[in-house]
Amino acid sequence: MLHRPLKTILFLLPLIVAMYLAPIIEDEFLIEEKQIAVEIPEWSELLDTIKVEVDTTLLIDTLTIDSVIVDSIKIDFNRWVPDYVNDSLPDSIKINGANHLHSFFAKLESISSEDTEPIEIFHWGDSQIEGDRISGVLRSSWQKSWGGSGPGMLPAVQPIPALSVRQENYGNWSRYTRFGQVDSTLEHSAYGVMAAFGLTNGDGTLIIKPHPSGFKLNKVWDRIKISIGGAPLGGNITIQGTANNYRAFSIRPASKSMHQEITSQLEPNEKELRIGFEGYMLEITGVELGSEYGVQFHNIPMRGSAGMLFTKLDSRHFIKQIKDRNTGLMILQFGGNVVPYINDSISAKRYGLRFAKQLQYLKSIKPHVPILVIGPSDMGDENKYPFLETVVENIEDAALREGCMYWNLFEAMGGRGTMVKWANAEPKLASPDLVHFNPKGARIVGELLDQAIREEYKNWVEWNR
């Protein structure tokens, strides 16, 4: 039977397109939906490891003697510096493209106790940063040097115990995330900058307490900011604590993609803050505890994510929540969840190209804010995940190509085979799953990253003398 050429082309075209898209669709599904079946780290370890108390008398001193004006910025040469900072660092710990940090340093040096908005740092990552690991070390260090307090942004419903604060929920609550197992019944994608929100219907209560073993400045809350997404009929919020008298606020009716914030000053020395929500299908996209100046550092873990979800969030809602913030730095720490599903260099390159799209999107929203990308650590034993280094290389290429910075965690910790050494060390520094750092190991990673950033800060200060 004869066919006309045009009919044959039209018949084959869908098959050709399907064959081309199949691996891309498959990879996308594997990357964002599948998760590594690993043992969850024991967060009880936090209670007997990180117990460093920060002396509030070491906060920024506005009456320094040795200072200089550089382009209208006063640089204080007497900043507090942690003991673990060395005079020189090996190349394996340094940041590639670190010149992009200069604008961040200038913002830090412009901080004044008269400010009404802190400089905000967003640290998005996978389960490697859960529990405020890594982020907490940086937050404590930078708040001691440049001022500020509080743990920053918290989810309304906290699934993983964190060292920053203790949270409890009572009443009718549900948690929705755009990472991990996504609820397909949800009819919108307005999850907010945490890619997660807590939904309360009727009455819901959130109780927040300082963590007794956390960094001291995490326990100092000068103000609270509550971010709200969908509120079909509006609602009410009440705030009351051991040091804060009862106060009430109204929530305006809002559609799913809208964003509103309720801010209130807090009295110091709070031991238990009780936040009540009343309304129909209220979506709470974040609760922030912090200060009116200094550094506010947001720890935003996304278990199971490969970092490819930013463009999948409702853009109008996401931009509303982040655009007007005084953002100084964005950190993206991803890649570990994709490594087990990369079987060749082509797949690794494809992941790098798609990750670059996320960087482009974030830069389009905050074009003058530097972005630091952190790739995966070492994983498994020496013979597992043969394309791990290839993934690391492609993430680094994507970051530098898009005008971002890259910190090679894989090399900083020692390269291939070192996760086994960290897991067998005394004291142990990694979990038995050979994927996650335990709290002691995460603290070391945080200190290494802090050293790398402070090395560049020191060079910047010397250059401006």
Image: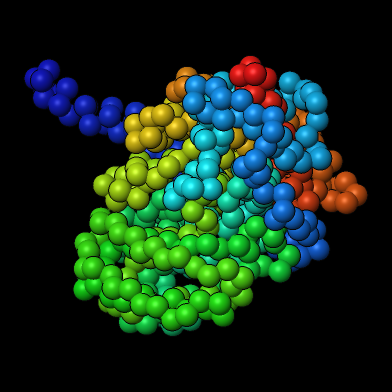
Relative to residue 131, is residue 430 depicted above or below? above
Q: Nearer the viewer, residue 106 or 439?
A: 106
Relative image position of residue 323 (x, y in whole percent): 34, 42
In the rendered view of the protein, which quadrant contains the N terminus?
top left
Left or right side of 81 for 95 = left
Q: Residue at 21%, 62% (x, y): give it.
A: 255
Residue 186 in view in this figure:
yes
Residue 262 location, quadrant: bottom left
Q: Nearer the viewer, residue 394 or 46?
A: 46
Which color scheme is applied? rainbow
Residue 155 in view in this figure:
no
Relative to residue 144, is residue 70 depicted above or below? above
Relative image position of residue 367 (x, y in whole percent): 38, 29
Relative image position of residue 227 (x, y in whole percent): 37, 60
Left or right side of 25 for 253 = left
Q: Nearer the viewer, residue 458 or 254?
A: 458
Relative image position of residue 171 (x, y in whole percent): 44, 82
Q: Residue at 57%, 40% (x, y): give it.
A: 333
- Total labels: the figure holds 0
Left or right side of 192 for 343 = right
In the rendered view of the protein, which quadrant contains the C terminus?
top right
Q: Nearer the viewer, residue 248 or 232?
A: 248
